Amino acid sequence: MRSVVLNGTLLDATQASIPITDRGFLFGEGVFTSMRVQEGQIWAFDHHCRRLARQSEAVGLQVRPLLRDDCQRLLDANGCHHGLWRLKVLVTPAIQLLTVEPFVQETQPLRVITYPDPVCGPWQRIKSLAYAERLWLRRWAQDQGFDEVLTLGPQGEVLELASSNLFWKLGDRYFTPDPVLPLLKGVCLELLEEAGVSFTPIRCRPEDIPPDAQVFACNAVQGVRSVRSIDAATYRCSEPPFSLSDHAGIVCACSS
């Protein structure tokens, strides 16, 4: 059984416990973030720390700072020096829990279906522990024979996928749903912007995405992936124009 770090203490996972009165356990009151670990290196650690602190404050949580030393002890204890791993940090009113599990890099272009009803609310911009809705939406898409689900805003605007942001390239320009909409702007988009990618915020319906656009999904664990189709519309698949580097989550342009 793997080790975890609970409130700064390294424990065997079988020995870790949380209070049954914890509001994260009872109500999903808490936030989390997932980080990519490759060959022992944590990608975009500072970005995740800032978002975790920002979102904890937004939902009224007072939490201990996330320490790189805690993360490193967890990686060392679980032998995460080679390959790909997902480091997850969960924060509730009572606990800070760090876990790590291996994951597989997915490269196949995504087939996406639109969920017909709006998915919006005051917590849509928060990476909340109340995550059952997102898991259910992805399962709904998979039950229809698709890989991922596209969610819509109150006026039918394109928002995001279950756990990824969406953007598309048309000519030399990049577009992404307006972050003012009820969506979570992820760390991967932040990295792309810091690397010099200029996104034009846009409000549109799925059918308004041009058929000759190249469409991509991105998150901080899987990086950038091509989208093959949204509903009946198909798009030209190509190598994603950017990839996360092997060092600290810097985004680099892929050579053509």
Image: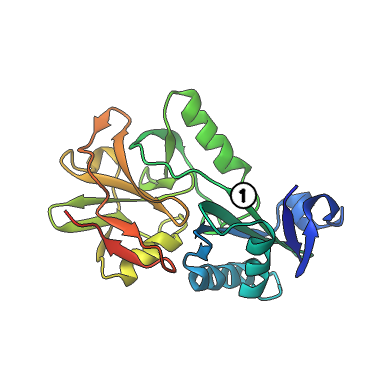
- Snapshot quadrant of residue 176: bottom left
Residue at 65% x, 63% y: name it: 76
Residue 67 versus residue 222 in the image, above or below: below
Whether residue 185 sits left or right of residue 73 in the image: it is: left
In the image, what residue occupies the spot 20% across and 38% down? Answer: 236
The residue drawn where x is 53% and y is 55% is 82
Q: Is residue 141 above or below residue 119?
A: above
Q: How is the image coloured?
A: rainbow
Q: Position of residue 150 (x, y in %)?
A: 41, 40
87 to the left or right of 156:
right
Q: Nearer the viewer, residue 56 or 18?
A: 18
Q: Where is mark 1, residue-wise?
A: 101
In percent of width and height, residue 231 lies at 33, 30
Quarter assignment of residue 190: bottom left
Location of residue 36 in the rendering, given as x and y in whole percent from the top left corner: 50, 57
Query: Of the residues shown, which amino acid type is indicated by label 1?
Result: Glu
Q: Is residue 125 left or right of residue 131?
A: left
